[in-house]
Image (spheres, coloured by chain):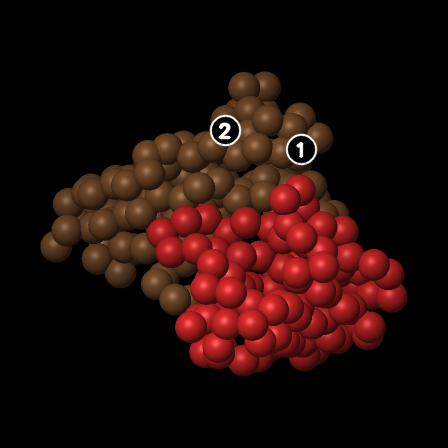
């Protein structure tokens, strides 16, 4: 089955700096890669996703890149703000809405004011 | 956007009792629902996938007799933790998907077994 790895497990950055989280996946059949932000005790919130026919996607301060050949994908947050502090999970799935989503282990991001 | 309601949000009970958690899709038909478990400071681990009207598919290592899943309608799935013990204490989250809807997560249930 699919296995998703994620690095780093913890990340501290100064407010205004950029944060980068990297993930790898194992199943070449995966073609949908969502990123979730989870605040303590709350549900995961989808913040951005990318499909395998696209190499990069950007939404304001957040961008994702995908290297399908290497099975790598990354999340980039620019101009970080304290409210960006949370746990971020990468995940892999197929584009079928009924397919299971496999989560990475998570990255705890702290943005220091 | 689509809404998934999960109930209860918090439950505390004695060891040996059974606990039922409900997951409802409020504005779309959920052909598939997923149940996850999350221990403190860990990731979401998929427990099982349930399709409406059929038996759930459990992930490796998840005891199907311990975690009973019922998905009797297109808007409701339930997870029953039978004979719960302290090691079953965790955050349980459901998600629902169907038709053109991607997975939408419920708010989660924090289960504490004394």
Which numbered tag is attached to residue A64? none
- Binning the other alpha carbons within 10 Å of mark 2 as few (below 14), some (14 to 19) or many (20 upward) gives many
**Nearer the observer, A20 or B71:** B71
Q: Position of residue A103 (x, y in %)?
A: 53, 44
Distance between the alpha carbons at the discs numbered 2 and 1: 14 Å
Q: Answer with left or right where residue A80 lies relative to residue A69.
A: left
**Residue A73 seen:** no
- Secondary structure, mark 1, is loop
Which numbered tag is attached to residue A1? 1
Q: Residue at left 73%, top 75%?
A: B76
Picture colour for chain A = brown
**Nearer the observer, A11 or A68:** A11
Q: Answer with left or right where residue B77 lies relative to residue A80.
A: right
Which numbered tag is attached to residue A24? 2
**Nearer the observer, B19 or A69:** B19
Q: Residue at left 58%, top 57%?
A: B36
**Do discs 2 and 1 belong to a common subunit?**
yes
Kindly report which numbered mark, 2 or 1, lies closer to the viewer in this rendering.
1
Q: Position of residue A100 (x, y in %)?
A: 67, 48
What is the chain letter for disc 2?
A
Q: Position of residue A5 (x, y in %)?
A: 47, 32
- Secondary structure, mark 2, is strand
Could you tell which of marks 2 and 1 lies nearer the N-terminus? 1
Q: Residue at left 41%, top 39%?
A: A75
Q: Residue furthest front?
A: B16
Which chain wears red? B
- Where on the picture, by quarter, is residue A1? top right
């Amino acid at each position: 089955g699919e296995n998703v790895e994620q690095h780093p497990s913890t990340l501290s950055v100064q407010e205004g700096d950029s944060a980068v989280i990297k993930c790898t996946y194992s199943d070449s059949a995966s073609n949908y890669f969502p990123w979730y932000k989870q605040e303590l005790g709350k549900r995961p919130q989808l913040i951005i996703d990318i499909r395998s026919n696209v190499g990069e996607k950007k939404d304001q301060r957040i961008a994702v890149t995908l290297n399908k050949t290497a099975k790598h994908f990354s999340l980039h947050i620019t101009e970080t703000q304290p409210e960006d502090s949370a746990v971020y999970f990468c995940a892999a799935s197929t584009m079928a809405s009924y397919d299971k989503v496999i989560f990475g282990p998570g990255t705890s991001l702290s943005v220091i004011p | 956007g689509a809404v998934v309601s999960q109930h209860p949000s918090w439950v505390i009970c004695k060891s040996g009792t059974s606990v039922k958690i409900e997951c409802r899709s409020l504005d779309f038909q959920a052909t598939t629902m997923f149940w996850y478990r999350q221990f403190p400071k860990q990731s979401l681990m998929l427990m099982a996938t349930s399709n409406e009207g059929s038996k759930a598919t459990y992930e490796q290592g998840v005891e199907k007799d311990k975690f009973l899943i019922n998905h009797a309608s297109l808007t409701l799935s339930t997870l029953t933790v039978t004979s719960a013990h302290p090691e079953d204490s965790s955050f349980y989250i459901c998600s629902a998907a169907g038709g053109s809807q991607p997975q939408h997560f419920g708010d989660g249930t924090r289960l504490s077994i004394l």
